[in-house]
Amino acid sequence: MVHSMTNLKIKPNITLLEAMKLMNNMGERCLIVVDKNNKLLGTLTDGDLRRRFLLGADFKSKIEKVYNKKPTYVIKGKYSLKEVRSLMYNRKIEIVPIVDNKMKILDLINYRSKINSIKENISILKKSIVFIMAGGKGTRLAPFTDVLPKPLLPLNKKTVIEHIIEKFTSVGVKNFYLSINYKSLILKSYFKELKPKYSVEFIKEEKPLGTVGSLKLIENKFKKPIFLSNCDTIINTDYPEIYKFHLKNKNKITIVASAQEHIIPYGICELNSKGQLLGIDEKPKHNLFVNTGLYIIDPSVIKLIPKNQYFDITELIKKVRSKKLKVGVFPIDEDSWIDVGQLEDYRKQIYKL
């Protein structure tokens, strides 16, 4: 169970956003913080980052105030692997650094191997359902969508919807529902020809039902939370972790949001109530969580969706919040989200995947 620390070590002067991107790129949930002499300073988990983001931290702030400065560690030659594994299991610790007498890192102990981790993730989502809203006209992608439905637009030798589905099948999901309306026969014919190894059931909208209205059509077909996805958003992140986050926090809806820093390239005038200048803020920066169009929905909230009416996800979220029920946000970094919903975005992404 002892594994290499390649690229897991970070310095305390990196930013929260840099740490999140590093975790995503490596598929890890914990990093080791060291000083310039390779001395152990602490550990940083994805949960540490998420909590900090959701509390309003500046995305470009350093991890110095975030990471755990009292990590669990063992000294080489002075530990029992069996006892350490038991401790990691009980405390839900991802990794334990192995250090020498001067606290310099020599190696680490990972509780689960990659193979076991993958098996666990597949087990978590094995019976999950993904509902993809694929019935829209995709007017922002005209003239391409004058010929093809948006889910079938090509993106690096595959269709957009195949990229979306493959992100889920890679973690064990086998059951998919597709709401269809615009050019529905083309979409159905494509999947018939594709002959996928996963299950696809088409839900026909007799009229446009908005971004969540069609979910009402399968109200009694699931008892556990399901993934709800736009057909123009591709997310490269830890889907099982999102699912566990949703369950742990007892959310009724979880929104997957992209953490982004936006800079206004102008000086912004600040005025008082009399219209007089208070000051000029040069190129202000704003930390934003952008809705990616991926959600987890609890079956209990489907009753709030009106039958056979146009209804958007924003309206459902408002209804859920008005009843004092929990709507959570799961942050991902901006590089983990590919949006092809507009012509300019689609052209940018054509050869990136």
Image (cartoon, rainbow, N blue to C red):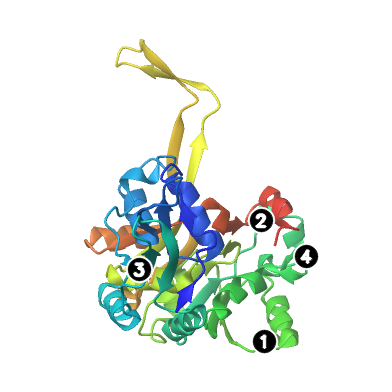
Q: Can you tell which mark lies on residue 147?
A: 4
Rendered image: mark on residue 139: 2
Q: Which residue is mark 1?
A: 196
| Secondary structure of the residue carrying numbered label 3 | helix
Instruction: Identify whether 329 is placed above or below 200.
Output: above
Residue type, numbered disc 1: Pro
Tell me the element at label 2: helix
Q: Is residue 15 above or below residue 101?
A: above
Vertical comparison of 313 with 124: above or below: above
Would you call the spot at circle 2 few (<14 residues within 10 Å), some (14-19), or many (20 or more)?
A: some
Q: Is residue 311 visible?
A: no
Residue under the image location 42 percent in, 59 percent down: 105
C-alpha span from label 2 to label 3: 34 Å
Q: How many marks?
A: 4
Which of discs 4 and 1 lies nearer the camera? The answer is 1
Residue assigned mark 3: 245
Q: Nearer the viewer, residue 151 or 62?
A: 62
Please, what is the three-letter code of the amino acid marked with disc 2?
A: Thr
